[in-house]
């Protein structure tokens, strides 16, 4: 499509197509009020293929031409970080990976049912920060994401959940920045959240209607659990510290 629009000019020879697409979309948003007023999280998810995806393809053209792009059909990207940062894919850089076992503190808890586990990826955290902190913060901190894993449990009744998450960032400084941002997000999620006296620079413990929240920063990682039964809070904290 872009080749048809640019005529004889090769997309690989153009200046940043991603920036061009972002500007075009911003200019056209006013024509689509339903989209322009949609939450940032969903707008980012919708535009990602057209902005970052176009930049990814342009980088592929610059590095290997149309022939080099054929490898995408046999070996597609595994993570959205490779789309945000095309060199990680085209230069075959290894992706950071982390594991997250099921915490013993939640095993056998009455009324708690495990639902699923997955990863949000850089796109997920970029969208989360942009929605609940600011778009500037998303652009600054989002690229510092390296890996994540989450576990989701449903509490009896189906109207509350328990979430356990492990994330890794590029440095202790960026993990601390995310710790502070997520602390702010928790305050928005749970307006009634109270603070435990054990909370510190790298640790937050609070109680809300759905249970206890434990947020911990360890080096380049940030781990947390939300909706933990109060009687299991100390065991969960000890488990997170041992990760």
Image: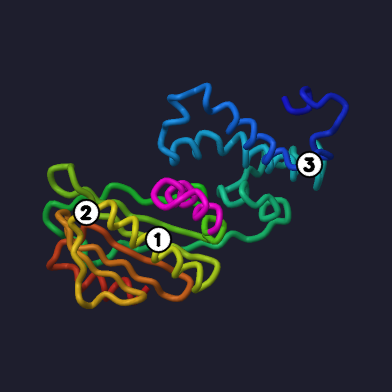
User: Mark 3 — residue?
Assistant: 15
Rendered residue at 21%/68% (across/down): 195
Q: Say which label, 2 or 3, has the lower sequence index.
A: 3
192 with respect to 38 (left or right): left
Nearer to the camera, 176 or 120 = 176
Quadrant where the C terminus sits is bottom left
CA gap between label 1 and label 2 equals 16 Å
By secondary structure, the bulk of the magenta-drawn segment is best described as helix
CA gap between label 3 and label 1 equals 34 Å
Rendered residue at 74%/45% (across/down): 59
User: Mark 2 — residue?
Assistant: 191
Residue 133 spot, x, y in % from top left: 41, 52
Q: Secondary structure at mark 1?
A: helix
Q: Say which label, 1 or 2, has the lower sequence index.
A: 1
Q: How is the image coloured?
A: rainbow
Height in image: 170 above or below 2?
A: below
**Label 3 crowding class (10 Å Cα cut-off): few <14, some 14-19, many 20+?**
few
User: Mark 1 — residue?
Assistant: 181
Residue 81 spot, x, y in % from top left: 58, 52
Write down the quadrant of residue 102 in the picture: bottom left
Height in image: 88 above or below 172?
A: above
Q: Say which label, 3 or 1, has the lower sequence index.
A: 3
Q: Secondary structure at mark 3?
A: loop
In the image, the segment drawn in magenta is: 124-140
Q: Is residue 134 highlighted in magenta?
A: yes
Nearer to the camera, 40 or 121 = 40
38 with respect to 164 (left or right): right
Is residue 240 in sight in this rendering? yes
CA gap between label 2 and label 3 equals 46 Å
Residue 1 spot, x, y in % from top left: 72, 25
């Amino acid at each position: 499509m872009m080749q048809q629009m640019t005529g004889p000019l090769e997309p690989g020879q153009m200046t940043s197509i991603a920036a061009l697409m972002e500007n075009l979309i911003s200019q056209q948003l006013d024509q689509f009020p339903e989209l322009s007023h949609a939450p940032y999280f969903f707008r980012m998810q919708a535009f990602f293929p057209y902005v970052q995806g176009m930049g990814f393809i342009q980088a592929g053209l610059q590095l290997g031409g149309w022939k080099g792009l054929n490898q995408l059909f046999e070996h597609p990207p595994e993570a959205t970080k490779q789309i945000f940062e095309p060199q990680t894919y085209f230069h075959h850089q290894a992706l950071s990976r982390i594991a997250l076992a099921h915490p013993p503190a939640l095993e056998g808890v009455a009324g708690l049912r495990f639902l699923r586990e997955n990863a949000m990826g850089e796109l997920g955290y970029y969208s989360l920060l942009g929605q609940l902190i600011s778009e500037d913060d998303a652009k600054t901190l989002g690229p510092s994401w390296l890996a994540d894993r989450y576990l989701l449990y449903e509490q009896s009744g189906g109207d509350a959940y328990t979430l356990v998450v492990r994330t890794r960032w590029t440095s202790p400084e960026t993990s601390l920045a995310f710790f502070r941002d997520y602390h702010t997000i928790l305050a928005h999620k749970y307006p009634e959240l109270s603070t435990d006296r054990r909370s510190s620079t790298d640790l937050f413990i609070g109680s809300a209607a759905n249970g206890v929240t434990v947020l911990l920063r360890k080096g380049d990682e940030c781990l947390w659990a939300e909706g933990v039964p109060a009687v299991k809070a100390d065991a969960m904290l000890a488990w997170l510290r041992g990760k």
